[in-house]
Image (spheres, rainbow, N blue to C red):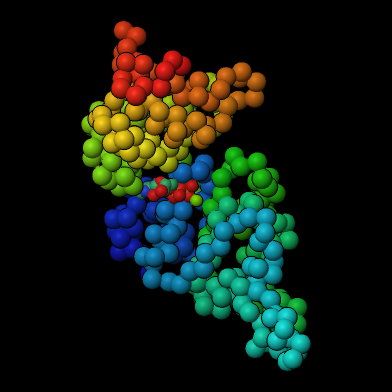
Amino acid sequence: MFDADLLGRLGDRVVGRRRELESVVAALAAGRHLLLEGPPGTGKSTVLRSLAEEAGVGFEFVEGNAELTPARLVGAFDPSAVLSEGYVPEVFVDGPLLRALRDGSLLYVEEINRIPEETLNVLITVMSEAEVHVPRLGRVRAADGFHLVAAMNPFDAVGTARIASAVYDRCCRLAVDYQSAEDEAAIVAVAAPDAGRRLAPDTLDAVIGLVRATRRHPDVRTGSSVRGAVDLTLVADELAALRGVPPDDPGVTLDAALLALSGRIRLREGSGRTAEDVVRELWSEHLGAGDDGTGPEHGSGGPGKA
Ligand SMILES: Nc1ncnc2c1ncn2[C@@H]1O[C@H](COP(=O)(O)OP(=O)(O)O)[C@@H](O)[C@H]1O
Ligand SMILES: [Mg+2]
């Protein structure tokens, strides 16, 4: 189950992340609930999904959002069946939480900070009591093997503050940060194998460098995750084919960078710049033709002056 074999199989599916994988496997082997916390695109879902598929245990997946009411999480009596049969257990439709409790499965909640307060309270009760009380149905105990595994983005404006003490005190927490440039290049190679191969290795490195630079730019509050590098690579490949030029053509990489990154970066309040402007600046540093002024204007199908 949660052992070194599992760790090996996870290592085959997840790029890098050895320490994080060990931490996740150890926490679950110890029977703990677990919260993964990190910016978007840092592989939290990839790690948890691989775990769910490789661990050989049941798992229930729940997307955390404002519509996740307690009834949706726990389950509810089928209203029409209740009319004919009354509140009997047979007409109760289990939600993901009850299925996980009864089967002793992993309950995997994405973006846990986004769920409504009352739903969060249900989870907090389950974490401390290992059971849930459902009106008219009764008590449902957690079977062996039930664990809550949750993920959240700590910089999300929605509901991160209220997660604090109640949840943190009842689970282990793993902070997940951006990976190294080498690992990010390897992730692009996995996520965009054909397009990645058609891009010269130096260009791929420059793409990774550009995306990472969005995370340190003084005008940027939140930079792009590795998803931006994957999109840039895929879009550059298609643009290059449409224009009949190689994917590292400057006009192609600039337009691909604008498409892939301008919506992903969040500028600081009052920076006075646009996202396009910042992407162009970073593009010229990382992928521009050099300091002779030859830029995309000279490439075929170039985007014109910045
Ligand atoms: N360590 C990794 N190994 C393989 N793919 C990864 C890794 N980290 C991120 N990815 C890829 O990057 C994208 C974003 O990862 P994801 O797990 O969804 O991030 P998060 O859940 O933290 O927002 C996914 O398409 C995933 O395939
Ligand atoms: Mg995720």
Which residue is rendered at x = 46% and y = 16% of the image? 306
Q: Is residue 212 visible?
A: no
Q: Is residue 217 left or right of residue 185?
A: right
Q: Is residue 302 left or right of residue 38?
A: left
Which residue is rendered at x = 30% and y = 64% of the image? 5
Image coordinates for residue 255, horizontal then vertical, percent: 40, 28
Image coordinates for residue 185, horizontal then vertical, percent: 31, 38
Image coordinates for residue 13, horizontal then vertical, percent: 32, 55
Occupied quadrant, residue 227: top left
Q: How many marks?
A: 0
Which residue is rendered at x = 38% and y = 18% of the image? 284
Which residue is rendered at x = 50% and y = 30% of the image? 262
Give the position of the N terminus as an image quadrant.
bottom left
> Please, which residue is most extreme toward the bottom here?
85
Image coordinates for residue 32, horizontal then vertical, percent: 52, 62
Please state which of residues 221 and 35 is positioned toward the viewer in this rendering. 221
Q: Is residue 80 visible?
A: yes
Would you place residue 159 above or below residue 240 in this image? below
Please state which of residues 31 and 82 is positioned toward the viewer in this rendering. 82
